[in-house]
Amino acid sequence: MNTTTVSSSPAAAPRQTTPQPRGYSERNAQYWQRNLVVCVIGSFTTLVSLSMLLPFLPIYVRQLGVTSQSAVIQWSGVAFGATFLGTAVTAPIWGRLADRYGRKPMLVRAAIGMAVVMSLIGVAHNVYELVALRLIAGLVGGYASASTVMVGTQAPRERAGWALGILSTGALAGNLIGPLVGGVLPGWIGIRGTFFAGGAMIAAAALLTIFVVKEEFHPESDAKSHASSAAAGSGGSARRPDYAVVAALLVTAMMVLLANMSIEPVITVYIGSLGVGAAHLARVAGVVMACSALGSMLTAARLGALADRFGSWRVIIVCLVLTGLAMVPQAFVTHWWQLAGLRVVMGMTIAGLLPSIGKLARQSVDESQTGRLLGYLQSAQFSGQVVGPVIGGVIGVHFGLHAVFFVTGALLVACGGLAHWAQRRAHA
């Protein structure tokens, strides 16, 4: 009797412990380094293919039937920007689908879609088809964006800044090497053959993604928001985002690309005003344009690691102010090599922004919503890439070439003030 009473008492009953389900990042901890390597290779390959048309895009536009010089310039700009516009529109959609169906399917979708569209560009019959296909490439593509979502959600939180910095280095290298490849390859296989080669490179990245990238995605748990558990009073495990801080992150991400691209429409004219002859102008302009990417490649991973060690907000504020200050002396150069050196410095300081912003974005929302927010982040970046040249061109026409550097520098410093306010709000 006594034994029965004791055994049936609640104090003596064995405590039932339900194992907590592992989160997405914990389940994929064994894969994130392997996936990071593939994402770097894929981002490099796809961005080489997308940017290699820069040196010969006006020539291709002329081959497609555009005759006047002004029309060639106009259509070249429209065709180049169409891809970024398409990516800006669809990046949040793909980020949301990544939260719902997994990150790997988005990588495979982007690689296959871009491989097909890149090959189709090589058989375009007129400039309208070229622009439409470039727009479709942005709408269905975005391998680098999908890579950011995968790496940003799989890498351990304490190493996310470094991992995103490595990924950024691969993307920057693609943007740097692409125009160099585009200056050589058409002479060997022709312009249309260059597009087919680009499609083949992306197809190889697609195969690598399909067979090497690994992901454990559980739709029944990973696709659901944890907000309901918070409402049920489960100790506040879900993270309620501070939308003001998130908005500050999005604005900062847009400013990174806006600042980097604002000088692009007038840089050739500006270099010409420094005494560079017409025979060497295009080559020198290409070198100067590549210098910011070169500088970013040198420091992106290191600054990402500093964000892991000292805090992302500190890196963002310092990099914004330093980049803004690095813009000002570019207005006073007297030789093209001085401009090139300052663009390298600017690239070194601006490189710490995107990895740090990506890490903060991951920490700002619940794990099940990370892909969606990183998608919005990519959209903001590509919006800056579209708006930057427009703003730079308008300022250059109405206020002079030097004013582009002053205005962009002031915007970056002001954005540093915004980041300081967001940091204080986030830590309040």
Image (cartoon, rainbow, N blue to C red):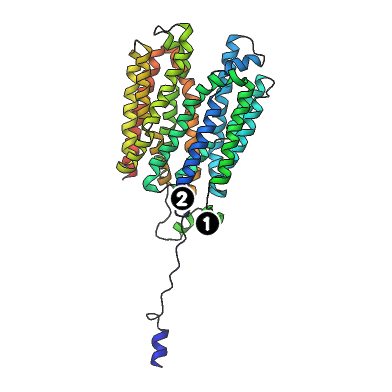
The disc at residue 367 is 2
- At 31% from the left and 23% from the top, the residue drawn is 325
Toward the viewer: 426 or 151?
Answer: 151
Amino acid type, mark 2: Glu
- At 35% from the left and 39% from the top, the residue drawn is 422
The image quadrant where one finds the N terminus is bottom left
The image quarter in which residue 114 lies: top right
Label 1: few (<14), some or many (≥20) within 10 Å?
A: some
Q: Position of residue 246 (x, y in %)?
A: 42, 40
Query: What secondary structure is found at the residue carrying circle 1?
Result: helix
The answer to whether 10 is drawn above or below residue 218 in the figure is below
Q: Position of residue 42 (x, y in %)?
A: 52, 37
Q: Position of residue 145 (x, y in %)?
A: 51, 37
* Residue 277 visible to an observer of this rendering: yes
Q: Earlier in the sequence, mark 1 or mark 2?
A: 1
Q: Label 1 belongs to which residue?
A: 221
Query: What secondary structure is found at the residue carrying circle 2?
Result: helix
Label 2: few (<14), some or many (≥20) within 10 Å?
A: many
The image quarter in which residue 428 lies: top left
The answer to whether 268 is drawn above or below residue 138 in the figure is above
Toward the viewer: 390 or 296?
Answer: 296
Toward the viewer: 264 or 164?
Answer: 164
